Amino acid sequence: MYQKKYKIFNKMITVTLSIVMLLSLAGCSTDENDKNNSTENGMNEAIESMVSKYEGFSELEENPVDIIISEDNTEQTDLSGKLDQETQNNNEPDDNIKPKSHPDSYYVTWLVPGEFTEFDDDRMSKINLKLEEDGYEFGIKLLRYYQSTKHDEEEDSYKQVYAYYSGNRRLETEDVSQVINNSGADIVYTGVRLEGSYIEDDMKAGIFVDLTEYIENGTYFKYLPQIQLDSMKYNGRIYAVSSLMLQDGGKIQLINRDMDQYNVDFASNPLNIFKYLSEDNKLYYGLDTLDFVELFGYSFDSIHGTVVDQNGKLINPFEDKRCVEWMREVNKAYKEDKLQFYYSDSCGFKLHMCGPGCVPEDPNAEYTLKIGMIKKPLGTTAILSTSEKKDEAFELMELFRKNPDYGNLLIYGYTVDGEGEKPKSAFNRKAVLGLDDGLLYAEPGTKTDMNHFMTIEERNKFYEENVVASPSLYIDFPTESYKLRSIIDNYLFFKNNILKKDNFEERFASLKKEYGEVYKRVKKLMS
């Protein structure tokens, strides 16, 4: 599962790649070659800038950005036999016909990060025209906020700042919650927040509408797999809907390319693998941070940084003898050139986390372990409590997901039967808007790491066969736990990975001390 550490890199990379974090919330493959691995990690470094939170805001004086958006239209097609039948009209809208003009109160407004969405006026006009033709009494306008990196000369550091409008004033803030709360939007993308401005705090403060009853009485979300709905809950209620791009159902697999030569008793004791390693028979290691604790019967919540046993009891992995021995063996094998932190198809062993698409299993898989779904509070979509069009907003959220014509118009600019150039990638738009099912194209370059569901039945069938619940799925961890995740990333992610360091023991002692202090506070809050 891709939760990784993100540091401020530069404005261009931050803008282009921060959405990759959302995919990291689902179980995805880490098998990369050396070049791809360094690229991915560079991307992930860039993303942390998006999620840092600082206090205060000030009026922005220069470089104004237009955040107003436009209108467009689409059509309806049923996603599933379970869903309400929609009037089907797959004729491409006439480009010469424009939607009517309406007052601002007619539109449902949707707040999104502008750099990631790139919606043109013509596309929005088509959507609004189609809404009119299909008899809806509302339209859609997108509101954009913009993020950039700002250098603090006094501290010689870089901070993530967000620009947005409040009335006619364009403001700048370092707190994405402030952008959301002051946007005046109906629907909002909640952002990826790991420090300071936590989405759980916004939920407790009543910033978002409780969508639980909306979903129960709706026509789309209630048909999602129950385990996926459970991943959206906070205190037993749903305040924000997870992106359908964030699929879970990953697996840890041990691949043995020479099964005739080696027969490792990995299931009874994963540490046995180290007996078989040599310079000619390396272990290609594709697990991130604390993924390895799953091998010992624990469950790692890579968003909150917590580890629990099968009964949901919080544990400290750095006090567990098997987990500590595993880390020492990995470090030793790496220093002896018996282990490499990337994937190879050559002979030897490959131990990796693969995404939900690694079905069927590799024929050389000697060991497979399903990884359970965890809560997914980040990168979600919510309706603001201040909205005066709550019903219309929820109807629109479901419409784009259950009706392929509307969804494809929004993502690609044309309906199911329409014509247009196939995009190289629409990942950012899909992730920010939370759309996936019923879209014309699977995401290029994702190979088997993500599934492409055309119907909600396909999604349910896959989840039933491949996805299990993590013991942490039903636990609401206190926001203090995010500090555990930050500590883990500081010691076990990419360049900071102490498993690659000569001074492993010294660094491990520091990790154990820092993690232990926060662990005690989290455990006390949960007791």
Image (cartoon, rainbow, N blue to C red):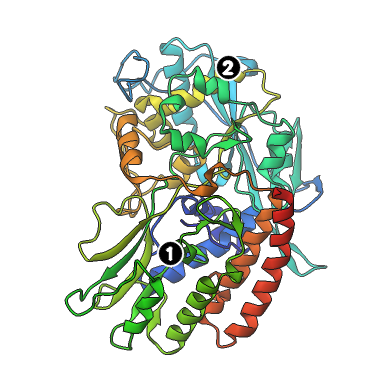
Picture residue at 65% right of the left edge, 73% below the top:
511
Instruction: Please state which of the two labelled residues, at mark 1 or mark 2, is closer to the viewer.
Output: 1
Horizontal side of 134 relative to 79 (left or right) equals right
In the displayed orientation, state which residue is furthest to the left. Answer: 260
Picture residue at 59% right of the left edge, 66% below the top:
489
Q: Quadrant of residue 90?
A: top left
Residue 198 in view in this figure: yes
Instruction: Looking at the picture, tell me which residue is in the foreground, 262 or 133.
Output: 262
Q: Quadrant of residue 5?
A: bottom right
Identity, as a three-letter code, of the amino acid under mark 1: Leu
Horizontal side of 476 relative to 95 (left or right) equals right
Q: CA distance from mark 1 to mark 2?
A: 46 Å
Residue 350 is situated, as x and y percent measured from the top left of the image, at 32, 71
**Neighbourhood count class around disc 1 (C-alpha, 10 Å): few under 14, some 14–19, many 20 upward:** some
Picture residue at 59% right of the left edge, 62% below the top:
6
Please report contact status of discs 1 and 2: CB closer than 8 Å, yes or no.
no
Residue 506 lies, with reference to residue 407, above or below; the image says below
Residue 274 is situated, as x and y percent measured from the top left of the image, at 38, 81
Per the rendering, the mark at residue 3 is: none
Instruction: Looking at the picture, tell me which residue is in the foreground, 17 or 83.
Output: 83
Residue 230 lies, with reference to residue 6, above or below; the image says above
Instruction: Looking at the picture, tell me which residue is in the foreground, 104 or 9.
Output: 9
Identity, as a three-letter code, of the amino acid under mark 2: Asp
Residue 421 in view in this figure: no
In the structure shown, which secondary structural element does the residue marked by tag 1 occupy?
A: helix
N-term-proximal mark, 1 vs 2: 1
Q: Quadrant of residue 244?
A: top left
In the structure shown, which secondary structural element does the residue marked by tag 2 occupy?
A: helix
Mark 1 sits on what residue?
A: 295
Residue 225 is situated, as x and y percent measured from the top left of the image, at 41, 33
Per the rendering, the mark at residue 391 is: 2
Horizontal side of 113 relative to 353 (left or right) equals right
